[in-house]
Amino acid sequence: MTGPKNLESRTKHLKQTWTKHCHRVLYMSSVKTDFPTVGLNVSEGRENLYWKTIRAFQYIHQHHMDEADWFLKADDDTYVVIENLQYIVSKLDPGKPLYLGRRFRPFISQGYMSGGAGYVLSREALRRFVNGFHTGECTHFSDIEDMALGSCMEKMKVEPVDTRDVKGRQTFHPYPLDHYVIRQLPRARPWHLLYDYYPPNEGPNCCSDFAVSFHYIYPVQQYVLEYFTYHLRPYGYFYRY
Amino acid sequence: MLSEGGSFIKGMLIGGIFCLVLSLLSSFSPVTESRTEEHHHHHVKAASKDELQQLSDGRLQELNNQLQVYCVIMVQPKNLLYWATALDTWTKHCDKAAFYTSESSKALEAINLKEKDDWVRLRKALKHAYENAGDIRWFFVAEPSTFAIIENLKYLVLTKDPEQPFYLGKAMKSGELEYVEFNSGIVLSYEALRRLVNVFPDEGKCPETGRALWKLSNDKQLAECLKFTGVFAENGEDVHGKDLFNSKGVESLIKESMNQNPNNVVEGCCSDMAITFSDMSPNQMQVMMFGVYRLRPYGHDFHDLLTFYPPKGSDND
């Protein structure tokens, strides 16, 4: 999800890094351009984000439904490791109504997935989302995109998936690495972990080796993460996990 | 009488100032600390995959086992956070990590050299390392604000004989002197260290006190001493000729690359097999630990010819 004023400053760098690993990438904006961006008939701004998301999924449902099994929504300041997402979904059935991401506890009884960390809908989940708006079961009842979408998912009986790895480490992250991996003395849950559905770990056990996403990743950090993920490595290292 | 005395004093003063200026000038190195291309013959490259594949399995196994690194880390209580971070991160991958301090700290253990002068302290540390090396044949000298990937250091020196003098790192030139920059880490083979330790007692070639009014930095003094023993600085590079020892942090280098190679930022930046980065905060070093030893895409297999196991009792790698 992006907009005209971010194409040069942010989205251009996503194009050079992680989006290359997608089978298909669509840059959703309010205006169609040669970037290329898809022009949805929505205004820019945070208050219009849920409208933009609804229109984006409707567009995909109309034009690209058969092209994939899984549909990832990310922001222009999210960094995603597509192979690690593939690893998770390879064990799941896209014909089932499934919804993946960083699960948050508040507001929605089955929880909802953080918008910034990126979330994934199975083909069936996408079908049900679009259908929900078609029948009026789902509405634009709030501006808060991730929470409102989570509410629609619950209404349409789409199941949230626990995306932690076998060691209980998180794969989707709504903040950059330094918010999680730095060692801390044992303490009460800090503000940025308050919404977590599953009890979070601080320090090295926070995050899976096969992490899927990080958020608030601006251009320099996009390339830094690309370098860490796909390039820099310890020769011959026998990974623990 | 007074005027004669006055001229004499004036003469002495002028003469004295003249001598001072002369000695200052003679020890003052020109500011052109340039990375000239001319010393392209003073570089050491990592072995290529082809070269490695020529080695027999037995030989590879032998090399894998013999390849041990003794890390000499120069710490001070005033840099306690960096010291603790180095202890918790990269130094765990050294076969032996020795911390040498100027004075003891209640918080962390180290070999207390009780020496305030940093050049003398470095000499003492290197002598101690040499005397306590055991079977270890490679030495890596750093400050705790350097982050090193020891596995990649081993890869660089894999086919090099430590009975030969090697003095590697990021090679810089200051006037006529080529030296390895301290903050990006210094690699010494056993033979290089042996020669160095043996020249230490020679006050003419390798004095404890600076040779002029202007004190040379430790890395340059080291280079001067080694030069007398016939050991010269060499730049550590990967098979593509990219620097393996970096005096800056990843973020800085990426920023530079975004300006210089906007269409190829990551490839134009840094080596995949980089050995050191410097000038990073302790938090950045913890993040780097995750980035280097953990974060990776599922399904990529490198079929490396060597295997290095994770250190015991560590949870961040």
Image: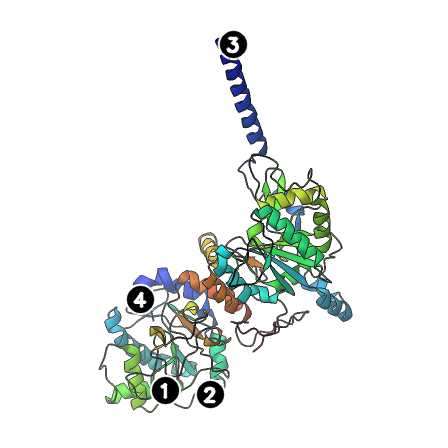
Q: CA distance from mark 3 to mark 4?
A: 87 Å
Q: Label 2, on which residue?
A: A92
| Quadrant, the N terminus of chain A | bottom left
Q: CA distance from mark 1 to mark 2?
A: 13 Å
User: Label 4 amino acid?
Assistant: Gly
Question: Residue B286 placed where, x, y %?
Answer: 49, 66
Q: CA distance from mark 2 to mark 4?
A: 32 Å
Looking at marks 1 and 2 on the same chain, the residue that comes earlier in the sequence is marked by 2
Quick one: SS at disc 1?
A: helix
Residue at the top extreme? B1
Q: Label 1, on which residue?
A: A125
Residue A41 appears in the rendering:
no
Question: Residue A63 placed where, x, y %?
Answer: 36, 79
Label placed on residue A160: none
**Label 1 marks which chain's residue?**
A
Q: Label 4, on which residue?
A: A3
User: Label 1 amino acid?
Assistant: Ala
User: Label 2 amino acid?
Assistant: Leu
Q: How is the image coloured?
A: rainbow
